[in-house]
Image (tube, helix red, strand yellow):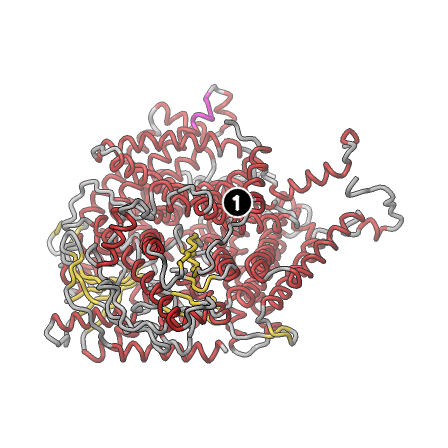
Amino acid sequence: MFYRRTGIRHTRYEQERQLFPLHFDRLLILLVLFLLLAAPLVLDRFYLAGYLLPWLIWSSAALGLNLLMGGAGQIHLGYGAVMAIGAYGSVHLVRAGVPLEIAMIAGGLLSAAIGMLFGAAALRVKGIYLAMATLAMQYIVDFVISQTPAISGGTLATLQVPPVRFLGISLRGDTETYYFALGVCIVITLFMLNVGRTSFGRALAAVREKDYAAQILGVSTFKYKLLAFWVSSFIGGAVGSVLAVCYLRAISPDQFHIELSIQILAMVIVGGLGSVLGPFFGAALILFAPIVLNNLMGFAASSLGINIPIDLRAHLPLVAYGALVIGFLLYEPLGLAKIYGNIRNYLLVWPFRHAQR
Amino acid sequence: MDFLLIAELALSGVFVGLMYALVSLGIVLIYKTSGIVNLAQGGVAMTGGYVTWAIAAGLGAPMWIAILLALVVMFFAGMMVERLALRRMIGQPVIMTIMLTLGIEIMLRGLMPGVFGAAVKRLDIGIPQSPVFVGEMLINRATLIGGGISLALIVVSLLFFNSRYGVVMRAVADDQTASWSVGIRVERAIAVAWGLGAVAATAAGVLWGATQGVDWSLSLLLVKALAIAILGGLDSIPGVLVAGLIVGVAESLATGILDPLVGGGTRDIVASAIILLTLLLKPHGLFGREHIERV
Amino acid sequence: MAVNRRIFVSGTVATLAAPAILPRRAFAQDKVVRFTMAQDFTRIYTFVTSEYSQGQRDYFTLINERGGVAGYKILAEVSDHANDLPRAIEAYERGKREGAVLCDPLSTPVARALVPRALEDKINLITAFSGRSDAADGTVFPYVLPLSINYWTQAGLILDYFRQQEKGDLKGKKIVFVHIDTPFGKEPLPILQVLSQKLSFELLPFPYTPPGNDQSAIWPQVRRARPDYVIFWGAGVGQTVALTEAIRNGLPMNKVSSSVWLSESDMEVVGKDAAKGVMKVEPCASGRDPKPIKDILAEVVGKGKGAGPEGKVGTAYYNYGVQMAALMVEGVRKAAEKAPNGPVTGPWLNEGLTAIANFTADGLLPPTTITKEDHQGGGQGRISRWDGAKFVPATDWFAANQDIVWGEIRKYSEEFKKTGK
């Protein structure tokens, strides 16, 4: 019924290779895109700055990490540090008077360069050992940033982001920052959608499945492991600068601690490892479940008169965060993207269920 | 440089390192049998501290009974975690188990303060505060006793692996399928390993809780414990002992010697640097067994 | 109960969808002043938040039970932001949409991210004992109000007390400064350095790694330095560990002082008798004697309307909460004096808050005067000592070294002005 496949006949190779062969998928994406573009005109600023903007930024970051974890099968527990490098690099450049367009890319390159060092560990160890190595690097980067006044910004350790312009548009209001983040997010998403069809993406997949086997097949694991870290760190750095410029507006070291790394990791896992759609779902759930739960508790306490001790009430969102991660791993290891896939498969043949498979 | 100061710092490092080693003992026990690194070990230690406090303060039990009860409770809690969560993860990629244990850590971090209250709790296990002097040198009595208890527990666990059930667990560690075929109940051995891991964590939680009070920050013991486990080799108990001493002394000396040079607290960075250096130079640690991978 | 995949997924969906279905609250009263009290109950500031928030809520209940202030009721929306910026910013934006005119995040990272937003939106951001110390400069930060003595002032107070103890002369003395190695811990260093030059004492800083649950290698060094005085500067677990280690290393407690972050529950953890004599800075009176606390006990807690356990009433952090709440309410009173019919907006409340003059809340606070220039409130505090059961004031309310503190404040606020606009 939905996602109709009837009448789709590929007569040329280009047609078969297109990203979304189904007409319905294309319409759906156009609809979502239209809604996102129209959001600032329709929605209140509260939803724009409180929900959509962080969602776009965190989704972009999760996409970058997903390339490394889902695409190349490498574990990274220090993605927050990578974003910190990009954020600090670009903010320092912007403060020095470099235009944001260049500063953002430079921040990304800086992240990529240092992120490659993380990758160097991946050449030597893998699995749980790689996780530990990246965790250690997270702490080391944190330490360097907060211990170097030249980086962290003096006694108060806060770097104010000066007013910036992107392609001549001042990024101050909510609408402008929203469109900027949306633009970056779309670019990253397009890259992720396409990367699976390139030789690069296929090489990553080979490395992910078994690195020795890939090496035997002639895929240089050395090259592709490092490249995977390079690309993913570049994205992380660029997103870090978007985060600093559009959302945080003043950066301090504690914003990029291990909690951020684990948060993004959780988004990737809950969303669905290796899927492009997953990080968007994952980011929404991990970011907003605590908020929604918090408001629900506030509502329960003030309107329904349910008296929950404040300690318990305050900690329940944290419990829920942990429970969500555990629950997804136990009950739906492929994440929200898989749930969407199931629904899509169901609707594909609805109401003729017997026709499935 | 003051020689006496260095000696004093090294000595305190030895005992503190032993207390950290107790946390990583649990990590090693679990990794040895099931091949999973338990990143929730810090959270479990915190839970142990909270449970002990709850029994002592809530039921008014004397401290030694509270500790014993807490150890028993936590043994079964550890087994439950394995049974309910980790066993389903058999055959999943390693990132899944990493994330699962992180999820457990997050949940415990919320659950314990949520239920028992976030304010710091006092856990008085009756160690006198006054210092001991050996000549000019001061020995911190609390870390001395804590380190001694940790050492004893680590030695006990070494002996345990020579007992009958210890041999069973060694067999499981060697080859799960082979142990299965000779009639060993692999699942139970792994569950017992989790239980013992939780017991070690609880002991550590009580010792640390007595020093700093019980609150969420007990879960931060994880990073040090990981450094020790990695340096000693993830599947070696003697490794824990040696690495604990090394990490403890290194951290203590770094605080005394490096801090004035850097002008900042280098203590945490020592653990990270040790993890990184071990992985780059000798990935399987000082005493760990090398795994040979086949395609 | 066996949880299967379907139950898990549908349960998650149901929980997330619930708020969309539930009816929104009706706002009956028209004369309401809304505050957003999104604070960190779960991550870093756990040691203070629950008591602080309890004090605030109890005081607001007291005021509302008495019929509000100048006809206005206070509606404080308490929630948890877990020191997580997306959650904090969401709470801030939500508050703003619902008409909140004041936000008290009680978290330094959150306050830093909210400062530019609050300045733009003209919402009063209370940054008591957190946020930027230079926010005391009201000319640069019109809508950021610490309303309390900042860390520079606290360091100045402690040193002045040491000076009084030594009969006005600290020359040749050795003062050790043990601090958590974070921006917050390093903050008083510039003031201490200036003062060490001026009063020619020797300053020895010792940083420890955050959050400070292991300081075993620091205190032997402190002991060996044989200091005349020790200042320890941290928060939460770092404080109790510092004190425990100081005791274990045999340092005399009556030469040891902390910032405002020391409470009765910390002393309980350390051991009430062992810590006898330790000093702290008090921004307001502690204990149950001040009139507002007595009123709360009688009219709120006594009637079973208390926001938390009764045992916490009158503890140090509880009183900090009452202090801040009292200042906010006083701000509302002043604002209503100036413009009785509102409308209730950020600038309306700001006018009131910056008109607070010589306010003591019946003896709870030092005389506090907030002006458009000085958002700190005069910089008065006092030193008190732990006597084994409670904190006993060792001095009267006093202000000290404010010239040096304001030099530092202006230095940083100038910097902010240059890059911010």
Secondary structure, mark 1, is loop
The question of residue B186 being in magenta is answered with yes
How many residues crowd mark 1 within 10 Å: few (<14), some (14–19), many (20+)? some
Q: Main secondary structure of the magenta part?
A: helix
- Residue C303 locus on image (x, y percent): 29, 46
- For this orientation, the residue located farthest to the top is B183
Q: Is residue A163 magenta?
A: no
Compared to residue A76, the image places residue C415 above or below, namely below
Q: Specify the amino acid type for callout 1.
A: Gly
Image position, residue C300 (x, y; %):
30, 50
**Residue sitting nearer the eye, C332 or C104:** C332
Name the residue nearer the viewer: B35 or C410. Answer: C410
Left or right: A341 with respect to B234? right
Q: Nearer the viewer, residue B150 or C158?
A: C158
From the top left corner, tell me how far across and down residue C234 is, in percent. 29, 60
Segment colored magenta: B184-189
Q: Position of residue A30 (x, y in %)?
A: 75, 55
Label 1 belongs to which residue? A127
Left-right relation of C152 to B106: left
Q: Residue furthest right?
A: A11
Identify which residue, A161 or C356, lies in the foreground: C356
